[in-house]
Amino acid sequence: MSYQVFARKYRPRTFKDVLGQDHVVRTLCNAIEQKRLAHAYLFVGPRGTGKTSTARIFAKALNCTGGPSIDFDPDEDVCREIAEGRSLDVLEIDGASNRGIDNIRDLRDNVQFAPTRGQYRIIYIDEVHMLTKESFNALLKTLEEPPPHVMFIFATTEPHKILPTILSRCQRFDLRPIPADIIAHHLVNIAANEGVSLSEAAAFAIARVADGGMRDAQSMLDQLVSFCGNNISEQNVNDIFGVTSRDTVARALAYMLDRQLPSLLHLVHELAEAGRDMGQLLSELMGAVRELLVSKVAPDEAGNSLPADWRETLNTLLSRTPTDKIIRLMEVLSTAEEHMRWSTNKRLHLEMGLIQAVHSLAEANVSDIIRALAGAPLPETPIATEPLPVVPMPGVPAAAPVAPAQPPISEPAPIMAQEAVSLEPIDDQPPLFGDMPAPDMPPQPDTPAERNLSPEDWESIMESVRAKAPLKAAMIGNTLFVSDDDGIVIIGIHPEDINTRDALLSETIMDLVREAAQALCSRRITLRVVADASVPPPVVEEMPPPPPMPTPAPKPAKKAPAPAPAEEKQAAPTSLRPSEEEFYNDPLIELALKEFHATLIKN
């Protein structure tokens, strides 16, 4: 018999052989036992998760001898024909190759025939999302009301491409990616049956690369046996498939948490020179950071993918790294992954992302300031960098390196909490123009006892303000003292008096008002300005009419232009000037008129 690859040789034959899909197996078995069989099923899931294998096992259970039954013999003739694709009652169709409407019409005609041996005529269409819209519409009526002996089973990796009218007529089963530990244990069993020594670390490395697909993992194991022979180690998996070992990932994570940026970049350089996939490296780092984050917030839910000899070191680094820093670290790495996905220079984006990630751990954020105010020490912020060599100038002795002076660390100033001011109208007053809370002021010595202000006090305050800031106070019009409720002084102004509102709420006037109020009542006040229509409106002074425009004086008559001065700068005598007839009869003038086709007009 010719050689069979592991993916075909170890394909599940019964429901008990299906791994990682317990929810699907249990539902199908209950449906068979309770005789609640639908006429159409849809299996959805990533590649290599068992869609076709589950469909064939389901077909065996339906058409086996004495079926439908979940306890069938996979070695009987009917089941072997179904497994090998030779059964006349189970028709397997590739949706990618038979996607036209003519193929669906032929299928619709063939389903009318009764089964030859079993109880059902089963139509299995793989990659059903590849059918055209016209093919789906041609199949729709038959799928809605098929003959009693016909059953449809569809499989797809992209269910969003299937028409909703098809989806609504099927029972949908979502097959999940198979967990890595289940894949690893299954690979160890396959290797034992084949006489191959496969280490547990190598099996987990294969499972991580397979990413939930059992068929991919079996194909990788088949390739490793061809390359390594009967002894497969984790290093062999790393060399063939470009996987980063768990020790290397843990070392890179330790460099990152310890802010040793030069060592981290040197490790990336070594991995890149060794031909490791940069995208795979970043994915491994993100998985490790995710495991650290989960172990910090929920220790019982953490996995065990990191090696045991690195856990103590990582736990020490983790204990002095706040949770918000790890979350920020994951955000930076996720951004780098997005940039790497569409870039040809993946190493550049990986290095930039790692540099930004290390610097994000050294940044002080609001949480650090709050912890510092509460008395907790700030996290360590320096980033380890390589010192630059000192190159002496020729003929000049090199000076000894001087340690940089550390500036004194001053304690952070306390944050002043501002008083919250309500913006609701008081005593049925119109809506507020604005509030201006006053800061705390130390009590002045030899001041009167604390009391509320009165209207007379407000007039005194206004007089004091006008005396100290006459220019600013000139904008203040009519004001009305409303009340003083334990330091909240309400002043009413006319709704249209915008100038008074702006002047009262200006910083200069408020300082003077608080100072004057402090001298009168020995307490700080919060000034609240409200609109009050009873206050007299602002007086608008009428502008005087503009003075009449002066009548312009008559323009003097234009004087005749003075004749051109002679060389002696004296006017020529009247007797020497040419007469009007001599000017018009001058030969030069006549020549110019003839040359330019002009005519002289006498005034």
Image (cartoon, helix red, strand yellow):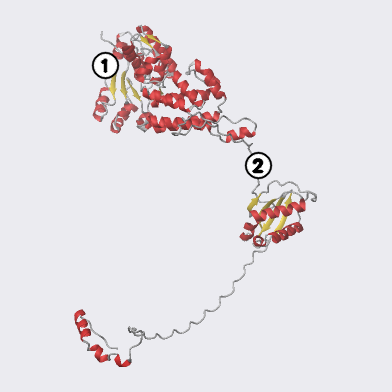
Res. 602 image quadrant:
bottom left
Res. 343 image quadrant:
top left
Nearest the viewer among 469 and 24 is 469
- What mark, if any, has residue 88 been given in the picture? 1
Q: Residue at x 27, y 90 (%)?
A: 578
Badge 1 marks a residue whose secondary structure is loop
- Earlier-in-chain disc, 2 versus 1: 1
Report, in whole angstroms, how far the alpha carbon at label 2 lies from the one at label 1. 82 Å
Query: Is the residue 52 above or below the residue 3 in the image?
Result: below
Q: Residue at x 34, y 24 (%)?
A: 154
Q: Count neighbours of disc 2 (C-alpha within 10 A) and say few if under 14, some if 14 to 19, many if 20 or more.
A: few
Query: Is the residue 581 above or below the residue 389 in the image?
Result: below
Is any atom of residue 577 visible in this view?
A: yes
Nearest the viewer among 215 and 71 is 215
Q: Count neighbours of disc 1 (C-alpha within 10 A) and say few if under 14, some if 14 to 19, many if 20 or more.
A: some
Label 1 sits on what residue type? Answer: Leu
